[in-house]
Image (spheres, rainbow, N blue to C red):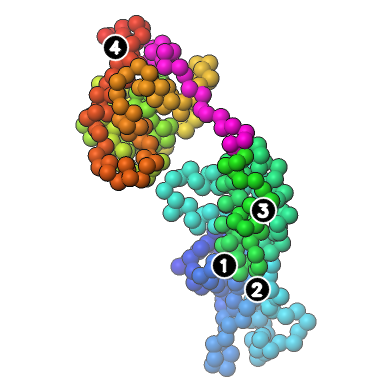
Amino acid sequence: MSISFDFQTLKNLSLVGRHTDPLTKGLHLWIKPSLQKYWIYRYTLKGRRHNISLGAFPGVSIKEARIKAQKAAIAIADGIDPKKSTTKEPLSQPKARPPTFQEFAEQWISNNEQGWTNKKHAYQWRYTLSNFAYPMIGRKHLDQINETDILNILQPIWNTLTETASRLQGRLERILSAARVQRFREGFNPATWKGHLDTILPSPKLVKRNRGIKHHRAMPFKDLPKFMARLRERGCVAALALEFTILNANRTSEVTLSRWNEIQGDVWVIPAERMKARKEHRVPLCPRSIQILEIARVMSNGEKYIFSPSDKPLSSMAMSMLLKRMKVSDTVHGFRSTFRDWVSEETNHSPEVAEMALAHTIENKVEAAYRRGDLLERRRRLMEDWADYCCSSPTAINLKAA
């Protein structure tokens, strides 16, 4: 396969095998299954084929490798075997240093992100590493990183950004484990949690319990009908998406990533890979939800996403920013709590139906084993009652009538 021999192309190249330099005869970049990259020069002398190592990439640059190959070609033309040359400038170099942490981490994420079901994971990995790890160890070679480095990264944020710090620790541990497997470092993994960092840092669960978990701000359900009437007056895609989210008690990503092929009549089928519990979720759609879809179909301009007029989904921040513009301090996720409070305090619908509507995982394993159906018809009645309540403001009733 012919490829461009420029730095960025070779840095990102992960196809195992030998790749020929189109400008220098006999020069090849050899990529091993471990994704380590080496320059080799192939030549024929006295009827026999030989290979000679010119060093590892990127430690040895493209320009340097070409110069070494040219020197070898000159030696061969003079009848000298480069492998046995005694010149002061040997063609092969001492073993190159391993890549830096940032180089290896970025390559590792690129190699693995295609297998992640949630596309946000790659962004989250890069975000935490860029903000907290790279400033400390990004330029350090993999074999230079030790326990002190890891603690310098984690300790400043462990008690304040506990969830982020805990996830970052797991990511550091996994990357350094991969580096050890690929023989870029030896010995114990300094980011290991069990039996190592857990003897120094307090348990994340304990930290969060002592600090007290802050829940998503949720609007009191008694204020919701007036808010829904205001929301209908906005007339933008984000407002339609937010109303749809509230009416169906969804999570943000379930709506922003929704596609037209998921709508089956008056039921919206969300595939398992987009659900938090990794289980397909059927949503019975009330008349107002169907009306929103009819409006969205015109606005989406034939694209695959329901709430986007382009080939990219609606931004995950669009609904939050709309709330901010409306001077509402509650969160999008908090409307799920509003729905749950309304069910408990204002209706006779059972808690299990409400939990199923929220797509919550059943914690009791015995109950989960016997729960076969998804209570679709009972949920349909619940969501219709919820929609009627959401539209119970006089303004909303007038809009509905119109």
Tell whether 150 sits left or right of 43. right
Crowd band around label 4 with a 10 angstrom C-alpha radius: few (<14), some (14–19), many (20+): few
Query: What residue did someone put label 2 on?
Result: 55
Report the amino acid beneath label 1. Val
Say which of marks 1 and 4 sits in front: 1
Q: Label 1, label 2: how many angstroms apart (C-alpha)?
A: 21 Å
Q: Residue placed farthest to the front in the image?
A: 366
Query: What residue did someone put label 4 on?
Result: 400
Of the numbered discs 1 and 2, the one sitting upstream in the chain is 2
Q: Is residue 230 magenta?
A: yes
Decide which of 172, 123 is in the foreground and name it.
172
Say which of marks 3 and 4 sits in front: 3
Q: Quadrant of the C terminus?
A: top left
Q: Label 3, label 2: how many angstroms apart (C-alpha)?
A: 41 Å
Task: Please say whether residue 41 is visible from this viewpoint.
Answer: yes
Q: In the drawing, what numbered circle is on residue 199? A: 3
Q: In terms of secondary structure, where does tag 3 sit?
A: helix
Say which of marks 1 and 2 sits in front: 1
Q: Label 1, label 4: how many angstroms apart (C-alpha)?
A: 62 Å
Vertical side of 8 occupied by 391: above or below: above
Of the numbered discs 3 and 2, the one sitting upstream in the chain is 2
Say which of marks 3 and 2 sits in front: 3
Decide which of 114, 151 is in the foreground and name it.
151
Query: What residue did someone put label 1 on?
Result: 181
Per the rendered image, the range of residues in magenta is 208-234
Crowd band around label 3 with a 10 angstrom C-alpha radius: few (<14), some (14–19), many (20+): few
Q: Label 1, label 3: how many angstroms apart (C-alpha)?
A: 25 Å
Vertical side of 10 occupied by 197: above or below: above
Q: Quadrant of the N terminus?
A: bottom left
**Residue 73 placed where, x, y %?**
64, 81
